[in-house]
Amino acid sequence: MAFNSQQTTRARAIVLIAALVVVVAIAVAVIAGGLNPASQAAQGADTSAGTTAGQASTDGTSSDAADSDADAMETVDAQYGTAAQSLRAQHEADPTNPTTLLNLANGYFDWGVAALNHAADDDDEAHATELLNEAIGYYDSYLADNAGAKSAIVDRAICVFYTGDHASAIAALEDLVTNLDAGFAPAWANLGMFYEAEGRAEEASNAYQTAIDAAGDEDAYGVRDYAESRLAALNGAS
């Protein structure tokens, strides 16, 4: 199936969104390791009065952060929820139009990824997962009649990956490059990201290199820079 201009734009955005989530995950890991054992021991040496004062300060900061996180999620839901409502209305008004169905799937994709990037606790993550599962359902409906829509397959796989089912997401893109289009650069770039997240460095490197080769100088889907940067990072770590 040939890509129309909307699908091409969507494919260019896929890897950028994936890169954003990877960067967020790395940042969280670094911050989580910021409190070393020495600083914990120093806290234990504080007087009870000092500890109480410090706890009060920490609680206040945590409360402010929680309020900020809640506000951020409310903003995400307000913005993307309104857009999704409009997209759903368009689809319900023209249910046989595949474009309105694909737009609805993409709308929930964007909402789910935005919610995931702002998730502050388990409830927020469950909310993001629910949105991504909504997107998966709409992609399934679209792909039932458009089985060769490669961008939709990649988008669906990303949703599946971020719901936690890494094996199924990887299998979907491996099937795409094996049986549908061995030269689809966005699939290879995202496969590289999936493999890298799973600690499969050699397979990730191979996938990124294949994405670079498939993209060529034209780089129609805008994945070359991302694949090159991740490949360089992996080579530097080896």
Image (tube, rainbow, N blue to C red):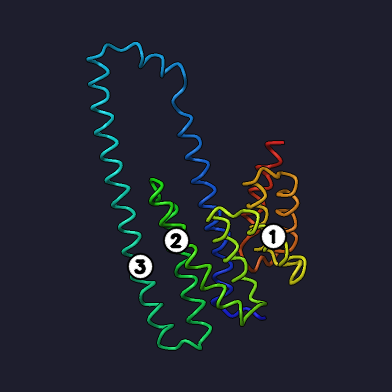
User: x, y (%) of residue 131?
Assistant: 44, 63
Quadrant where the C terminus sits is top right
Q: Name the residue located 69 percent from the left edge and 64 percent from the top edge.
A: 185
Q: Name the residue located 75 percent from the left edge and 58 percent from the top edge.
A: 210
Instruction: In this rendered view, identify the residue nearer to me: 214 or 18.
Output: 18
33 to 132, vertically: above or below: above
Counting residues from the start of the chain, the first of labels 1 and 3 encountered is 3
Helix, strand or loop under label 1? helix
Quadrant where the N terminus sits is bottom right
The answer to whether the residues at label 1 and label 3 have Cβ atoms under 8 Å apart is: no
Write down the residue under mark 1.
171
Answer left or right for 141 relative to 125. Answer: right
Mark closer to the observer (1, 3): 1
Q: How far apart are marks 1 and 3 (CA)?
A: 30 Å
Write down the residue under mark 2.
130
Specify the amino acid type for callout 1. Ala
Write down the residue under mark 3.
81
| Structural crowding at the residue carrying mark 1, measured as other residues with C-alpha within 10 Å and reported as few (<14), some (14–19) or many (≥20) | few
Q: Name the residue located 36 percent from the left edge and 77 percent from the top edge.
A: 86
Helix, strand or loop under label 3? helix
Specify the amino acid type for callout 2. Glu
Helix, strand or loop under label 2? helix
Specify the amino acid type for callout 3. Gly
User: x, y (%) of residue 127?
Assistant: 40, 57
Q: Distance between the residues labelled 2 and 3?
A: 13 Å
The quadrant holding residue 237 is top right
Answer left or right for 98 relative to 218. Answer: left
Answer left or right for 189 relative to 60. Answer: right
The quadrant holding residue 191 is bottom right
